[in-house]
């Protein structure tokens, strides 16, 4: 089962589900114990094999578009304004040289609230 390391999560589920399907009696328990996976994972793999799950992702992706966490600035756009307000007070350096500015802010003087 060294080949499992080279598969992505969907391929791994489907491979183990096909092995469980070919074994027969007590197939799910055997594969789950040997591979160290949850029964729900194996059942999801069986569902993916029975349905046309791979047709949902024709370009080879394994997750749906738009999944995952949204960027924090998308949720709270005013956060960038607060950051600029705090850092503008404690910025040192020449204004002409933007890349050489630095912040002189410490946790002792950090405005909390």
Image (cartoon, rainbow, N blue to C red):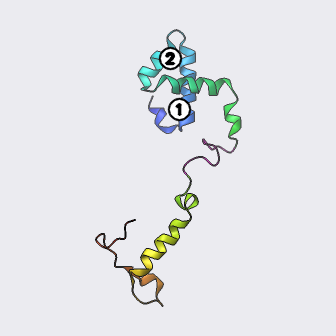
In the rendered image of this protein, does residue 98 appear above or below residue 107?
A: below
Look at mark 1 in the image and give the residue it sits on: 12
Horizontal and vertical percent for residue 65? Answer: 65, 47
Look at mark 2 in the image and give the residue it sits on: 28
Extreme residue in the top direction: 25
* Main secondary structure of the magenta stretch: loop
Q: Secondary structure at mark 2?
A: helix
Front-most of residues 64 and 25: 64
Q: State the residue at coordinates (70%, 38%).
A: 56
In the rendered image of this protein, does residue 61 appear above or below residue 111?
A: above
Horizontal and vertical percent for residue 78? Answer: 54, 66
Q: CA distance from mark 2 to mark 1?
A: 15 Å
Q: State the residue at coordinates (58%, 22%).
A: 18
Q: Residues within 10 Å of mark 1 (few under 14, many from 20)?
A: some
Horizontal and vertical percent for residue 110? Answer: 34, 71
Residue 62 magenta:
yes
Q: Quadrant of residue 86?
A: bottom left
Q: Secondary structure at mark 1?
A: helix
């Amino acid at each position: 089962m060294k080949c499992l390391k080279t598969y992505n999560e969907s391929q791994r589920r489907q491979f183990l589900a096909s092995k469980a399907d070919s074994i027969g009696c007590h197939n799910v328990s055997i594969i789950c114990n040997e591979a160290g996976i949850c029964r729900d994972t194996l059942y999801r793999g069986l569902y993916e094999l029975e349905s046309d799950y791979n047709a949902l992702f024709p370009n080879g992706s394994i997750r749906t578009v738009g999944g995952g966490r949204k960027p924090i600035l998308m949720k709270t756009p005013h956060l960038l304004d607060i950051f600029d307000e705090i850092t503008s007070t404690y910025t040192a350096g020449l204004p002409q040289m933007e890349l050489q500015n630095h912040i002189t802010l410490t946790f002792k003087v950090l405005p909390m609230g």
